[in-house]
Image: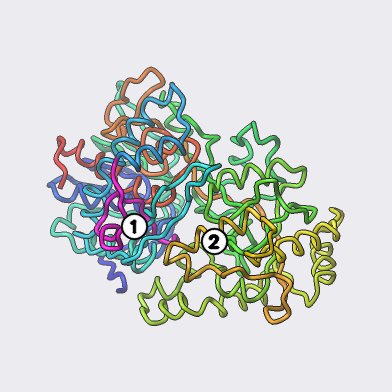
Amino acid sequence: MAIQANFKISSSSTTTRQADVVIAGAGISGIVAALELLESDLKVILVDRDAKNKIGGLAKESFGAFFFVDSPQQRWTGIKDNVDLALNDWFESAGFGEEDIWPKKWAEFYVNNCTQLGYKWLRKQGVGFLPVVNWIERVSDKNPGNSVPRMHIVWGSGKGLSDTLVNKLLTHRNIANLQILFKHKVTEIISKNGKIAGLNGINKITGNKFTIEADNTVIASGGICGSIEKIKANWYKPWGDPPEVILNGSHKYAEGILHDAASELGANVTHMDKLWLYTGGVEHPTPRHPDHGLSILPCKSALWLDSHGRRFGPEPLVAGYDARNQVETVCKQEHKYSWQVMNMKIAVRELSISGSEHNPAIRDKKFFRFLKGILFGAQGLVDDMLANCENFVTANSVAELADKMQALSGDIKIDRQAVADAIQHFDKAADPKSGIYDRQRDLIRQVRKYLLDGIRTCKDQKIDEKSAYPLIAVKEHILSRKTLGGIQTNLESRVLTATGDTIPNLYAIGEAAGYGGGGVHGLRSLEGTFLGGCVMSSRLAAADILNGKLH
């Protein structure tokens, strides 16, 4: 459904406006907060730096995944989940420290309430979900993660989520109480007499400065992962120096301007080195901003090799398990990137790219096209990447593949023998009766026991098999995505100081708040908790502004 916008981009020369609530950021967090606040008679101004057609922010470009516990989809497919199990998985993955008081409280609140305050509320707004639940960040005997599938995909992807909520917003009975100002960059949070009194900024259309005076101010401006400079400045020190190349898979305006502004006013901005990154970054064939990257979801049946072409080990890296450990393993190298080696058969069956852009069947709600992709793979996507993305190379022999990897590697030497040996061992272990044990083969067989993964994962597929040629290698960089730290908040999304006091009339929601509490995830996200955290924290902020009333 197309968005029928009934507002205009403001180009007024007026420098000052008044509102009951001003929200900085028209991503999914800002939209949810505005939608909830319109249930009252309050006057709301929603301010965004981007253009009108970009409303929805990074969520609009996302795959559209939510983490829910004991949902109707889980029960329908026979998945037995409960709060205790989910909370145990979350805490094991988070690795919280004793000082993480508010992140722990947010984690407990999320797990206990996500299905009621997230799933049921979204369904009420008209958001639909696929009937089968994905299993990402799996638990294993060596890594924490999800004990059962919990990743619920929006039918329509992130774009469908954004369009649905925007349409609800623009057709709300109290729409007259809402102003939306696009191309307005917020630069400062106003403080008067110890209270927050609104926002200052620049109208990027006219160049004029603007002021919005408000009784309550909500920061919904995202994280810092749109700034490669800030990522490197906040790099997790135990990982050593940051990679020379980090691709940008976040929103181009996620630069942390309001993190800095809030910090200057005493807000506790915390855990900013807890960055949620991916290992499968490739250059976007048609980039829309500097360093624009795509997130390849690594194939489970592909071999994961280091920058020299040597297989990671002794514990191999396998897609679908502990993404943070994968980033850490890649970043322990001198050259902090990796390779995926596979063949065309594996790529067509298993390769995918995160986000709505490269999942048109889900995004456009084309059921039969979606079903066809599940059953027969993504030949079109693979062909597009092979033709247009320079991170992909193909070959008709292992020796030729190693040569092409070397050409992409420049001065960093590829160990050709290591590439050949890794493929040979992996292929021998494809036969369960061979007596050759391979940990990755074992994990793949476990993965295939879940029906959805069984359909989308090759069975005992060899790499160096002529009928599955050509061979494919993908050079993958670290890619930015989400900021797990942020502005610390209590369970009402009120901004806190380092001493635990609230800053009057100031709220932070979504990624700006580390999805709640300044770091609800701890070290790891269990995936689907990003959008869920945006919805939950935004609803709680609006409820507090409305004197504790959730609608």
Q: Residue at x 57, y 79 (%)?
A: 379
Q: Measured along the vertical axis of the image, is residue 277 above or below residue 106?
A: below
The secondary structure type at the circle numbered 1 is loop
| Towards the viewer: 487 or 177 | 487
Give the label on residue 263, or none: none
Q: Residue at x 25, y 49 (%)?
A: 115
Q: Which residues are magenta?
A: 60-83
Crowding at dot 2, Cα within 10 Å, few <14 / some 14-19 / many 20+, comes out as some
**Left or right side of 505 for 207:** right
Q: Which residue is mark 1?
A: 10
Q: Amino acid at mark 1?
A: Ser
The secondary structure type at the circle numbered 2 is helix
Outermost residue, top side: 499
Location of the N terminus by quadrant is: bottom left
**Left or right side of 6 for 527:** right
Q: Which residue is mark 2?
A: 445
Count of residue discs:
2
* 131 magenta-colored: no
Among numbered discs 1 and 2, the one appearing first in the sequence? 1
Q: Residue at x 42, y 36 (%)?
A: 188
